[in-house]
Image: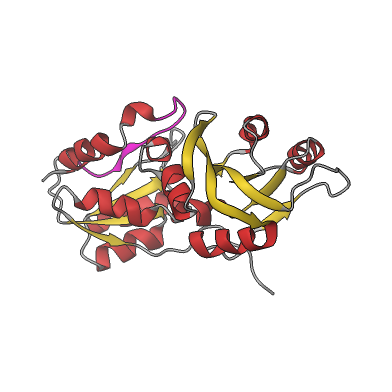
């Protein structure tokens, strides 16, 4: 199997046609004609992930976040992108990415997050997310613990305007969007969700959402999407290649002092 064949396999379960226009999935560095021996799976193609992949016998590194989003004017090995490309070419590691196509896939990021929470009766949320129902109503406190354990989170922040009478303290209907989903909070509100789970909401977006009566659960962007990597590895392995999860922790992550 060559890299181009692996990309064709990925296209069967996370079609590249699903990717947003601004996205850049596919080959980041390497050759379409390189033979695939073992595939490393990671969230971000940072230099540590490339080195770890090579040391684990992987000559392909499949990352969720593309290494290159904008045209490069130079390859400076003193910056992270340049250093990653240098390490990849030096060690014979081909870097590919499946980003918003994996977000939207039937078994991708959002579907995996919903499955881990055991949500049923799923409906689409905006262009990316999902809305579903819990098996049984849970207190907000218990649901927060359920999220953290199900997704392997180090932290979850809950925001709500407790002065509003309709603020929820029990959860049955859940909206979620893996990664940066701030723009979909109104869709979450209109869906009748008790809580909206996402990452990267700004201060004033939180004010608007909570003043509208929506409870927000904010998590680390990387930790949230990292929960889907075992599923991605499983899907890749169906084409007969060995996979290895490259456990570079979600970047960036806060210090716990």
Asked if the magenta segment contains residue 29, the reply would be yes
**In this picture, residue 3 sits left or right of residue 215:** left
**Predominant secondary structure, magenta span:** loop
Q: How is the image coloured?
A: secondary structure
Q: Find residue 108 and report its image quarter.
A: top left
One can see residue 86 in this view: no
Q: Find residue 184 and report its image quarter.
A: top right
- Give me the residue at 30% from left, 32% from top: 15
Q: Residue farthest to the bottom?
A: 257
Asked if the magenta segment contains residue 111, the reply would be no
Of 136 and 229, which appears nearest the observer? Answer: 136
Of 231 and 57, which appears nearest the observer? Answer: 231
**Residue 225: where, in percent of width, then height?**
47, 51
One can see residue 160 in this view: yes
- Give me the residue at 14% from left, 56% from top: 37
**Residue 168: where, in percent of width, then height?**
74, 48
User: Which residues are drawn in magenta?
Assistant: 19-31
**In this picture, residue 234 sits left or right of residue 199:** left
**Residue 142: where, in percent of width, then height?**
64, 63
**In this picture, residue 10 sits left or right of residue 175:** left
**In this picture, residue 76 sits left or right of residue 192:** left
**Residue 199: where, in percent of width, then height?**
60, 47
- Give me the residue at 42% from left, 63% from top: 248
Q: Is residue 95 above or below residue 90?
A: above
């Amino acid at each position: 199997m060559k890299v181009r064949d692996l990309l064709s396999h990925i296209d069967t379960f996370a079609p590249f046609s699903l990717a947003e226009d601004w996205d850049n999935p596919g080959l980041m560095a390497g050759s379409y004609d390189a033979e695939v021996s073992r595939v490393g799976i990671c969230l971000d193609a940072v230099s540590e992930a490339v080195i770890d992949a090579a040391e684990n016998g992987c000559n392909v590194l499949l990352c969720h976040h593309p290494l290159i989003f904008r045209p490069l004017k130079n390859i400076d090995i003193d910056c992270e992108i340049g250093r990653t490309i240098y390490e990849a070419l030096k060690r014979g590691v081909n870097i590919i990415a499946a980003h918003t196509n994996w977000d939207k896939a039937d078994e991708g990021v959002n579907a995996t997050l919903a499955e881990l929470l055991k949500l049923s009766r799923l409906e689409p949320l905006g262009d990316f997310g999902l809305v579903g129902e819990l098996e049984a109503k849970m207190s907000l406190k218990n649901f927060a613990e359920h999220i953290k354990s199900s997704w392997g989170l180090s932290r979850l922040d809950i925001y709500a305007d407790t002065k509003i009478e309709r603020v929820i303290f029990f959860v049955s209907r859940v909206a979620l969007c893996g990664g940066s989903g701030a723009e979909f909070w109104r869709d979450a509100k209109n869906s009748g969700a008790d809580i909206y789970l996402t990452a990267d909401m700004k201060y004033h977006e939180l004010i608007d959402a909570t003043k509208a009566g929506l409870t927000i659960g904010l998590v680390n962007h990387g930790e949230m999407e990292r929960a889907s990597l075992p599923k991605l590895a499983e899907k890749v392995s169906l084409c007969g290649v060995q996979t290895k999860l490259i456990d570079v922790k979600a970047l960036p992550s806060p210090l716990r002092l």
